[in-house]
Amino acid sequence: MAGTPATEREALDAYSATIVAVAERVLPTVASLRVHRAGVRDGGAGSGVVITPDGYIVTSAHVVAQSRTATAAFIDGSEYELDVVGADALSDLAIGRARAATLQPIEVGDADNLRVGQLVVAIGNPMGFSGSVTSGVVSGLGRSLATADGNGHRRFVEDVIQTDAALNPGNSGGALADWQARLVGVNTAVAGMGLGLAVPINGTTQAILAALMRNGRVRRAFLGIAGGTRALAPAVAQRTGFKAGVEVQEIVSDSPAAAARLRSGDLIVEVDGAAVSKAGDLQRLMVETRIGSKLSIRIVREDRLVALEVVPAELK
């Protein structure tokens, strides 16, 4: 015989118990950051999350922008000076290191395993209220977040997590945790009433964080195009075997794309054997190891597949 369904009270008790358990494990790993900026009395504030026992803390790049130090305060009352190791505006991620012998780190999860409707818990320091806990669900996956680095370079952070867990100013850089208290996102933006966004913690962002810890910056390859996702016409898709690609809408002069004779209207469908169906696919391929390396690309031009070679430069 099937088990008796849980009563409403039992379900609510289980929900509450889960939130309490997550909060107890995550709260000691989340810091309230007070940012120091030269010549500014109040340099701003945000949140950060300890990711290694030796004091590395992840936060949002916009929280520590134009600063080299901050103060990290924890829920147990301890405070440490924080040195900003590196920041990457194009992913809105930054790494700092607290001047502490040892800190309690959060367990790092993988946002690629999230599902829409899954319980998540946001922990940070909104409006100066340290150690604030809110809960909700994953409202959407695969969102895009527009970023810029101040040098005219724009990028979309792909696969951003949308949640209805309440986020407010000061939450940026804080933890978005799953029901097992694992870090799956770094809260980054409040997009509207009941709509929060978090940069996912996955293989791509782990590589960015490792580069920041190692070098203080992220080196990216650069083709020199502006483009967007476009589907192929059904007949062309059937003939070429590709359903969509990245349409070249603009080409930067004297760029690798210009040297490779890419044209406006070309549709990039493959780079070095990897299919490219959307802008995020192309962005993920433009990593440090591609700089200066000859890449074979396939494009659809005038409904025909064309093979070209391009040598990406470093994004400055």
Image (cartoon, rainbow, N blue to C red):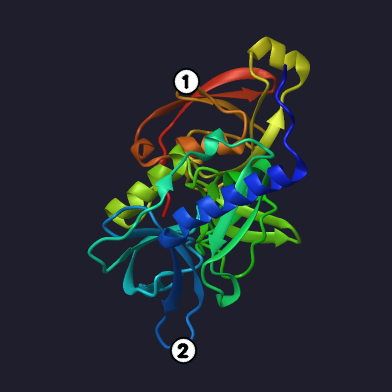
Question: Residue 19 location in percent, x, y?
Answer: 58, 52
Front: mark 2 or 1:
2
In the displayed structure image, the side of residue 181 where residue 248 appears, left or right? right
Counting other residues with Cα less than 10 Å from the Cα at mark 1, is it few (<14), some (14-19), or many (20 or more)? few
Q: Residue at x 34, y 49 (%)?
A: 211
Q: Residue 273, labelled with which disc?
A: 1
Question: Residue 264 location in percent, x, y?
Answer: 64, 37
Question: Residue 234 location in percent, x, y?
Answer: 77, 17
Splitting the image into 4 quarters, where does residue 127 fall?
Answer: bottom right
Question: Residue 86 location in percent, x, y?
Answer: 36, 61
Depth check, front residue: 268 or 93: 93
For disc 2, the marked residue is: 41
Depth check, front residue: 151 or 70: 70
Quarter containing the N terminus: top right
Q: Residue at x 26, y 69 (%)?
A: 99
Amino acid type indicated by mark 1: Gly
What secondary structure is marked by label 2? loop
Q: Which label's residue is closer to the chain start, 2 or 1?
A: 2
Q: Residue at x 32, y 57 (%)?
A: 216
In the displayed structure image, the side of residue 198 where residue 183 appears, left or right? left
